[in-house]
Image (spheres, rainbow, N blue to C red):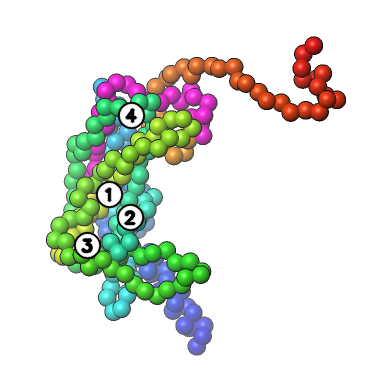
């Protein structure tokens, strides 16, 4: 009997993680697996164009207090983090720039499909070993909004500095949700443009730039810029016995 219960729980866990796949109308892939979105990036005059194409999403069910909630997921994407708000796929684009002034971000193209009768699971506080709680929190104010959330599917999220290089952060939200109508709006395409006042991409030739290649997006678009060489000042600590070896006579 215990073995049967264990197998049943294991099956339930697997089902809640994998769920079912919703395929969009533009999906030409004949596969039972969830596909990663495609991302295309190129330059046009003084702009960076980023084009996301989505073919499907995964719907993971979970039952709470008798209500069946679902979590939409996109391969390679995380989830939004506002506690009590509907869990939605989220991705952060990183684009390194050598100048962060006079930058305009514009959504230039998008298309979507709506799917009804989905009650989305609200994001919960992370649990720790010292504060295990079964309390379930759902923000009733957010779930009373009769509009698609978030309001914008792309958002500038400021900058960060990595190894002396400013990194532009762009939030991507490929699924919106109307809590009142229980409708998820799944975008199969999101295309946006970053217009620059000048060609101010960072240089791949920077020695320290190699350390951030894994976290930024426009590797193939880096402009060649020569990094000024500087003679470093060194502090060498040594005992008197070896002083003659490091100090020229």
| Mark 2 or 4, closer to the camera | 4
Residue at the image point whose x is 16% and y is 61% from the top? 145
| Mark 3 or 1, closer to the camera | 3
| Mark 1 or 4, closer to the camera | 4
Q: Are marks 1 and 4 in contact (CB under 8 Å)?
A: no
**In the image, residue 159 lies at what x, y percent?**
36, 37
Horizontal side of residue 138 vs 185, given as left or right: right
Secondary element under disc 1, as helix, strand or loop, is loop
Confirm whether the magenta stretch covers residue 207.
yes
Badge 1 crowding class, 10 Å Cα cut-off, few under 14, some 14 to 19, many 20 or more, is many
Asked if residue 24 shows in the view, the reply is: no
| Mark 2 or 3, closer to the camera | 3
Horizontal side of residue 148 vs 50, given as left or right: left
Question: Which callout, 2 or 4, points at the residue further toward the start of the chain?
Answer: 2
Could you say which quadrant of the image residue 170 lies in?
A: top left
Residue at the image point whose x is 38% and y is 64% from the top? 125
Quickly name the residue at label 4: 100
Spatial CA distance of label 3 from label 1 is 17 Å
**In the image, residue 18 lies at what x, y percent?**
38, 64
Secondary element under disc 4, as helix, strand or loop, is loop
Q: Are marks 2 and 4 in contact (CB under 8 Å)?
A: no
Q: Is residue 69 above or below residue 113?
A: below
Quickly name the residue at label 2: 80
Q: Nearer the viewer, residue 94 or 54?
A: 94
Quickly name the residue at label 3: 142
Q: Nearer the viewer, residue 78 or 33?
A: 78
Badge 2 crowding class, 10 Å Cα cut-off, few under 14, some 14 to 19, many 20 or more, is some
Question: Which callout, 2 or 3, points at the residue further toward the start of the chain?
Answer: 2
Badge 4 crowding class, 10 Å Cα cut-off, few under 14, some 14 to 19, many 20 or more, is some
Asked if residue 106 shows in the view, the reply is: yes
Quickly name the residue at label 1: 173
């Amino acid at each position: 009997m215990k073995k049967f219960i264990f197998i049943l729980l294991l099956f339930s866990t697997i089902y809640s993680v994998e769920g079912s796949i919703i395929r969009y109308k533009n999906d030409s892939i004949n596969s039972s697996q969830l596909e990663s979105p495609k991302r295309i990036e190129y330059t046009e005059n003084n702009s960076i164009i980023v084009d996301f194409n989505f073919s499907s999403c995964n719907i993971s069910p979970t039952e709470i207090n008798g209500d069946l909630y679902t979590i939409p997921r996109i391969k390679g994407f995380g989830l939004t983090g506002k506690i009590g708000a509907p869990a939605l796929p989220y991705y952060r684009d990183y684009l390194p720039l050598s100048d962060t002034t006079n930058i305009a971000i514009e959504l230039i193209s998008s298309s979507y499909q709506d799917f009804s009768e989905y009650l989305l699971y609200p994001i919960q506080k992370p649990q720790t070993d010292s504060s295990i709680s079964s309390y379930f929190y759902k923000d009733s104010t957010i779930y009373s909004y009769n509009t698609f959330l978030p309001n914008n599917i792309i958002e500038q999220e400021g900058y960060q500095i990595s190894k002396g290089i400013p990194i532009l952060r762009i939030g991507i939200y490929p699924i919106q949700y109307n809590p009142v109508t229980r409708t998820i709006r799944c975008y199969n395409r999101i295309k946006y443009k970053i217009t620059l006042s000048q060609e101010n991409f960072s240089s791949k030739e920077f020695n320290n730039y190699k350390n951030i290649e894994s976290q930024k997006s426009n590797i193939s678009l880096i402009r060649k810029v020569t990094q000024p060489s500087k003679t470093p000042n060194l502090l060498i600590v040594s005992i008197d016995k070896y002083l003659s070896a490091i100090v020229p006579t």
